[in-house]
Image: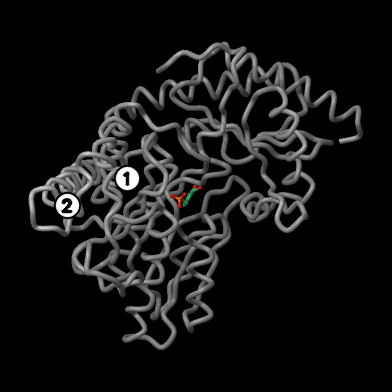
Amino acid sequence: MSEQEPSDDIYLDHAATTPCDPRVFNAMRPYFSERFGNPSSIYRLGQEARAAIDTARAQASRVLGCDPAEIIWTSGATEADNLAIKGVLAAAMTRFAHPHLITIGIEHHAVLHAAEHMRLLGAEVTLVPVGPDGIVRVADIIAAVRPETVMVSVMLANNECGAIQPVAEIARAMRNRGVLVHTDAVQATGSLPINVNDLGVDLLVASAHKCYGPKGAGLLYARSGIAMDVVMDGGGQESGRRGGTENVPGIVGCGMAIEQAELLRERYVRHCSEMRDALLSEILTRLPDVELNGPPLGPLRLPNNLNISIPGVQGETIVLAMDLEGVAISAGSACTTGRTEPSHVLLAMGMSDERARSSIRMTVGRGTTRPMVTAVAERLARCVVRVRELGG
Ligand SMILES: Cc1ncc(COP(=O)(O)O)c(C=O)c1O
């Protein structure tokens, strides 16, 4: 885990994206230049690219514990979530006039907006509430099942509050009910096991840039035999399930990043929890009134995630003040069309508007060091004092 002087800029937004691992980048590089062939071409240059895709497929399938043919490469998790939800519900429309999807209000918009799209086309969608800790109760999912329920979509871990969902339990409960289970494992990759058989899921999504791979590459695991319509029609790539010339360097990077993330997982979890726990404790020493959002630090929370509310200040103001201090973090609110909207995740957890607006998220990573943690806590305390003096 690399060293970085605390006087340098400090990046604590690893849930937004991660730097590309140099080993991953080096593996990708030839596929931009000398090995630039189209994998559909039958001559050697094309077949070299095809072989690289197959290698990446084997790497990812070993981590997922699936057949390589069950992996569909996509342009990232957004596309993979869209394919899972739209593809499965559209295919189910031959069986049901109004196929039913169960999901939770704290999903990423890639899931929520795809679900809404399908609702407008005739599907029915139930949003099961989560508790104040951001975790859904399995009994509430079971209670939402109807005869027309086709799929449950519950993320393995949440990107904002770090809550880990009981996906394996949900999958066990759905198996004899004939309901498919889809999980967005984007934030869990490298932190939790993502073996699809141990989880018991039928569809799983991962994204390379959240685990030290490149942006614009991800995958959908779809258990063999699942009825799923094609969303991206085209030249029949990915066995006809996703058209479009493959992003060969991205796929090479995705396979390798997922493999590396799994190899490093235990060490990464230990390192991140240590840094994250120290960060909270250093912050609490300086700012005793901050409140932790999401599950307590421990097994129900991603090891790299810290989400806190700081009474009396706006999260976005702190993000900008911290940027001036050289620290990159994110807020539990986002500016859309000129207005600051509190996070849908924190609101769905039952948080007040005010507390959601005063939240910030800090996510540590492989390169986070103990001196950085102290520097961030010091700079945060300085920013909060300054912002409070200016009236929040
Ligand atoms: C949980 C979750 N799902 C999906 C996505 C979208 O991933 P991508 O950037 O690969 O489209 C993200 C990215 O923030 C995420 O955190």
Q: Circles 1 and 2: CB distance less than 8 Å?
A: no
Q: Is mark 1 within 8 Å of ligand 1?
A: no
Against 202, residue 164 (above or below) is above
**Residue 164 appears at what percent x and percent y?**
47, 44
Q: Quadrant of the C terminus?
A: top right
Instruction: Left or right? Give the position of 34 relative to 361.
Output: left
* Residue that appears at 49% across and 19% down: 274
Q: Residues within 10 Å of mark 1 (few under 14, many from 20)?
A: many
Q: For residue 26, which quarter of the picture?
A: top left
* Residue that appears at 84% across and 30% down: 387
Residue named by callout 1: 250
Residue named by callout 2: 68
Q: Nearer the viewer, residue 150 or 324?
A: 324
Q: CA distance from mark 1 to mark 2?
A: 17 Å
Instruction: Left or right? Give the position of 332 relative to 255.
Output: right
* Residue that appears at 67% across and 44% down: 332
The residue under label 2 is which amino acid type? Answer: Pro
**Residue 269 appears at what percent x and percent y?**
41, 27
Q: Earlier in the sequence, mark 1 or mark 2?
A: 2
Residue 172 badge: none
**Residue 333 appears at what percent x and percent y?**
69, 47
Against 284, residue 75 (above or below) is below
The residue under label 1 is which amino acid type? Answer: Gly
Instruction: Left or right? Give the position of 158 relative to 6.
Output: left
